[in-house]
Amino acid sequence: MSEVSRLPSFPRGALIGAGALVAFALGIATLGRMTGPDQSMRDVRQVAQLDLRFQDRADGALAVFNADTSKQIDLIVPGSDNFVRATLRGLAQQRKREDEGPSVPFRLTRWADGRLTLDDPATSRHIELAAFGETNELAFAHILAANGPTL
C-alpha cells in the first residue's frame, strides 16, 4: 500500500495579500516618481555668491577672506565651527590628490529656493550644505552674512 504524503501548504490568502502589498508599494513609488517635485524645475537663481579664501593662522584660528577684495570677513576661532573646518579639510585633501593648489577660491552660493552650496571650481566638487543639517549650514550662512550683501 502506498502512502501519499501531504505537506501543509502556505495559506493562499497570505500569498495573495503579500503580492498585493508589493504591487501597491511599487505602484505608489512609481506614481511618486512620476508626479513628485521635479528637481529640474527648482528656482536656480543665485541671490548671493561669495568667492572665499581661507588661511590657517599660527594661533589655530581660520581666517576667512573675500577672494575678490582680499578683505578678511570672518575669523573662526579654535574650537568653533568644526563643520567648516572639516569641510575645508576634505576639500583641501581632494585638491592635494588632484595636484591643485590654493590659487582658485571656493564659491559659497545662496540660491533663490533657500539652498546654500559650497563649490570648489578647482576640483568641480559641489556640496549641498543642507544635507549636513541646519546647524552646519548656518555656519556657512554666517560667513556669507559677514560679508554683507553680494551679487
Image (cartoon, grey):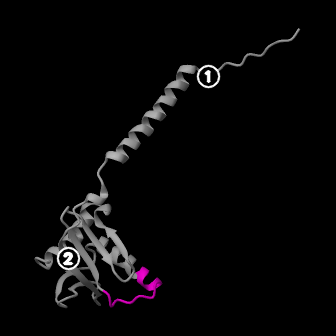
Circle 2 crowding by C-alpha within 10 Å: few under 14, some 14–19, many from 20: some
Q: Horizontally, is 122 left or right of 4 in the view?
A: left
Which disc, if any, is residue 41? none
Residue 102: x, y in percent?
A: 34, 89
Kindly indicate whether the residue at mark 2 contacts the one at mark 1 (C-beta within 8 angstroms): no
Q: Start and end of the magenta stretch?
A: 93-104
Tell me the mark number nearer the camera, choosing from 1 and 2. 2
Q: Is residue 99 magenta?
A: yes
Residue 60 lies in the magenta-colored region = no
| Image coordinates for residue 148, horizontal then vertical, percent | 11, 78
Residue linked to disc 2: 49
Q: Which of 112 and 144 is in front in this view?
A: 112
Quarter placement of the C terminus: bottom left
Q: Which residue is drawn at 20% across and 82% down?
A: 75
Q: In this view, does 64 lie above or below 21?
A: below
Residue at the farthest right position: 1
Instruction: Say what amino acid the circle numbered 2 marks.
Output: Gln
Per the image, label 2 sits on a secondary structure element best described as: strand
The answer to whether residue 62 shows anywhere in this view is: no
